[in-house]
Image (cartoon, rainbow, N blue to C red):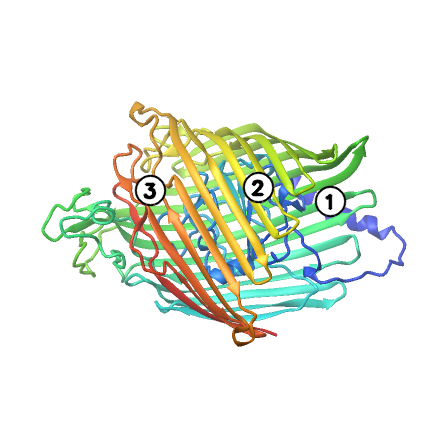
Amino acid sequence: MNGTALAALLVPALAQAQDATAPAVLAPVTVEGDRSADTATSPVRGYVPGRSATGSKTDIPLEAVPQSVSVIGREEMDDRGAQKVDEALRYTPGVFSQPFGPDSDTNWIFIRGFQATQTGIYQDGLQLYSYGFGGQFVDSYTLERIEVLRGASSVLYGGSNPGGLVNYVSRRPGDTPVRSVEAGINQHGTAHLGLDVGGAIDPTLSYRLTGRIAGGDSYTDFADGFRGTISPSVKWSPNDRSTLTVLSNYTDIDETHNGGAFLPYVGTVKPASFGRIDRKANFTEPDIDTYRRRQASIGYEFEHRFDNDLTFRQNARYGYSRVHEVTVYPFGYNGFSAVPTDPDNRLSRINFEHTTKVNTFLIDNQLESKWQTGPIAHTALVGVDYKYFKMDQVQASGSATPISATNPVYGAAQGPRFSYIDQELTMGQLGVYLQDQMRFGQGFLVTLNGRYDIASTDADGTPAYDGKDGKFSGRAGLAYEFANGVTPYVSASTFFNPVLGSSAVAGVFKPETGQQVEVGVKYRPAWMDAIFTAALFDLTRTNVVTGPFNAETQLGEVNSRGIELEAKANITPNLKAVASFTALDLDIKKDANPALIGKTPYIVPQVQGSAFLDYTFRERALDGVSVGGGVRYVGSSWADNENTLKVPAATVFDARIGYKPAAWGVNLAVTNLFDKEYVASCQTQFSCGYAEGRTALLTVNMTW
């Protein structure tokens, strides 16, 4: 596999060598601004996206993808004051974000009922694999757009979350000058300062430098920290057929953990004898609590267009991260009980520490070709990609002193921690894929995909295991583009997702497999800048891993089916709107425990809905003033797979007011406007998390 990767690295040089044989005199190159045309990586105009590459690895309109795709652009993120990816996804159908409440170091995301954080996060089309504590954290300030492809995507990306994936699209260098600085602070004392500058150095070279530092207190007791990220990038276009973009990042985080999570069901969802636990309480030990992350990445995107509608692309990235974490977190009441057992209402706690080092390398080679066979126009894609993931991890835990849920006293000496994982884990995955998008008959669009993956896993140390799997994935889609902008479609796809790990119960985990059928319609009207989508889907996932550490089982089969609706509109130049609705039916179809068959897995709500409206005044007295408001409904969910404990639904409101008269602006964004206190979700009765309370973020920005 290493030889394959090394050989692939030589292809850009071969393309450049071909150019060297061409005549020395080149035609004049006209340099246009980035925003002159809508592309799959350009800024979204208002709230309405036009094109994407996430659903096909080719730059095409959203309507041409036979699956559901949502795009959240920079303007939408800024209007709502989203500071993390999971905050930006609150208004996206099919997505349940922040299931455990606000988490400063992880973006927890569920798509169509399945957790996407481990295998469903991508950046610029390359996977950000996360196993254990071995993922990379990406600051949303460095992103131009966030894209969600819902449903199985193995045909393009190999092993990936069957519910869908989230693709982060980085801010990129271009010819148009970018000069922006932003400062912000919320009522808790968390402040940030961001910088985004870029532009052309000469006709062939452009750059961009994006960075942010942030720090201060959080909404819970004892939680504070400091973080910084910087993303330099350059783009080189030596001629009108070749481009090379280099993207890099360095991130450093030093903070302590938030409270409000790992809390018992009784005392949060349901009142205990003493009432409810304060959502601002933090039951760690402040003197030892630590979270330290250092990570870096560098990669490139190379493209060369040949003469005969043939385009070669190669995208690659190397990443490194090191995370060290120490925390003490609650797990039930004293004696690991589900209810209080003593007059002090003490909570049991676990003393935890880990050190995790990760190295990753990914490369994706694509050859796109366009040709005609009779009445059929083809856009074909052939690709070979390779993923390498190596993690060195040590995890340790030990007993901790109990602490009162109502009158916590800190500073007690904690016992030793004992290592239960000391492991070096390596994963490699090689995939070959084909795609053909065929247009014919004045509106028909057929998409066919096939992919074969070979994945190998080797774990040395404690625990030790190894395995190798190979699997085919496919997708077939049919759509018809009516002249009035309506595009109905149907698609069927299969997926394959290797699972790292083993347990004393299940042994080495089997690969996940499954299939999805989706029917839907997309509508882009000619009379308004908008896109409306509706989708029905039926998704089956087998060999789902669940259960406590070292006793995990693979449930067997879980089915997710439902409906998703989304509307995004720039109704007028001054009025923008988004709305979404999701209804899920999640069922455990097969399980070793017959009592769970027909039950709904915990965490994910079955109904969600949201709407957000934003208006900018242009009248003389109010010129530049903008106001916005939104509502989010999160339906009820289950706290246990037995479906005996329910987490109730909640409705929250968001609002904003801004003023941007010219090159500077100010924005006040408030989430959970009325400070509703509710539990986001529970994963068993011992681990519930409060949703984020009211947060008011004031930002000031200036461009020049």
| x and y, in percent, of residue 309 in the image | 79, 43
Query: What's the mark number on residue 387?
Result: 2
Query: Which residue is under mark 1?
Result: 312
Q: Which quadrant holds the N terminus?
A: top right
Q: What kind of residue is marked 3?
A: Ser
Query: Which residue is under mark 3?
Result: 636
The answer to whether residue 330 is left or right of residue 123 is: left
The answer to whether residue 124 is left or right of residue 176 is: left
All told, the count of numbered labels is 3
Q: Secondary structure at mark 1?
A: strand
Quadrant in the picture for residue 488: top right
Q: What kind of residue is marked 1?
A: Phe
Q: What kind of residue is marked 2?
A: Lys
Task: Choose mark 2 or mark 3, whichever is in front.
Answer: 3
Query: What's the mark number on residue 39?
Result: none
Measured in 3D between alpha carbons, the distance from the residue under mark 2 to the one under mark 3, in whole angstroms, is: 38 Å
Q: Which quadrant holds the C terminus?
A: bottom right
Query: Residue at (73%, 44%) from the top-left corner?
Result: 312
- Label 2 or label 3, whichever comes before in sequence order: 2
Quadrant in the picture for residue 607: top left
Query: Residue at (26%, 49%) from the top-left corner?
Result: 263
Kindly indicate whether the residue at mark 2 contacts the one at mark 1 (C-beta within 8 angstroms): no
Q: Secondary structure at mark 3?
A: loop
Q: Return the residue nearer the eye: 637 or 361.
A: 637
Task: Choose mark 1 or mark 2, whichever is in front.
Answer: 1
Query: Residue at (28%, 45%) from the top-left corner?
Result: 687
The answer to whether residue 524 is left or right of residue 611 is: right
Q: Return the residue nearer the eye: 14 or 266.
A: 266
Q: Return the residue nearer the eye: 689 or 127.
A: 689
